Amino acid sequence: MDRLTTTIKRQWLAEIIAGSKKIEYREIKPYWRDRLAKVNVPFEMRLINGMQQRAPEVTVLIHKVQKDIKNGVYKLQIRKVLTVKNWNSKREKPK
């Protein structure tokens, strides 16, 4: 299965892990157009909060990609959370 890796802010990472965020948004720009063209849906997306070796991360299954031209974003539909690493769910809760 294809996989993309990118960074994400802590707030959005917490919401994805909690299950309250089901869509990840990325701007419609050549960078994302090219990256999304290289993968077949469904694909895994690894989202990392930071660049440290033990940075919190989540891997999700993206099952649908929609292009929202009106708002200038790609909507990446999250089917399920596959793995969570370096995350303390008791201490970290979404706001």
Image (tube, rainbow, N blue to C red):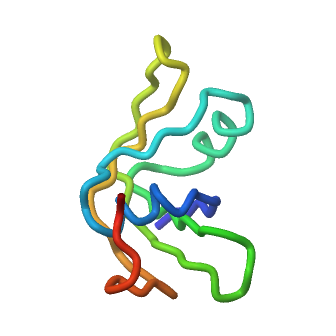
Residue 25 appears left or right of 78: right
Residue 22 appears left or right of 44: left
The residue lying at 65 percent from left, 39 percent from top is 32
The residue lying at 25 percent from left, 55 percent from top is 20
Query: For the view shown, which residue lies furthest in the top direction?
Result: 70
Instruction: Find residue 87 and report its horizontal and vertical position in percent.
Output: 45, 84
Give 37 or 19, whichever is nearer the viewer: 19
Q: Quadrant of residue 5?
A: bottom right
The residue lying at 71 percent from left, 87 percent from top is 53
Give 55 or 83, whichever is nearer the viewer: 55
Q: Quadrant of residue 34?
A: top right
The residue lying at 60 percent from left, 40 percent from top is 37
Instruction: Find residue 29 and report its horizontal and vertical position in percent.
Output: 69, 28
Quadrant location of the C terminus in the rendered image: bottom left
74, above or below 91, in the image: above
Residue 65 appears left or right of 56: left
Residue 48 appears left or right of 50: left
90, above or below 47, in the image: below
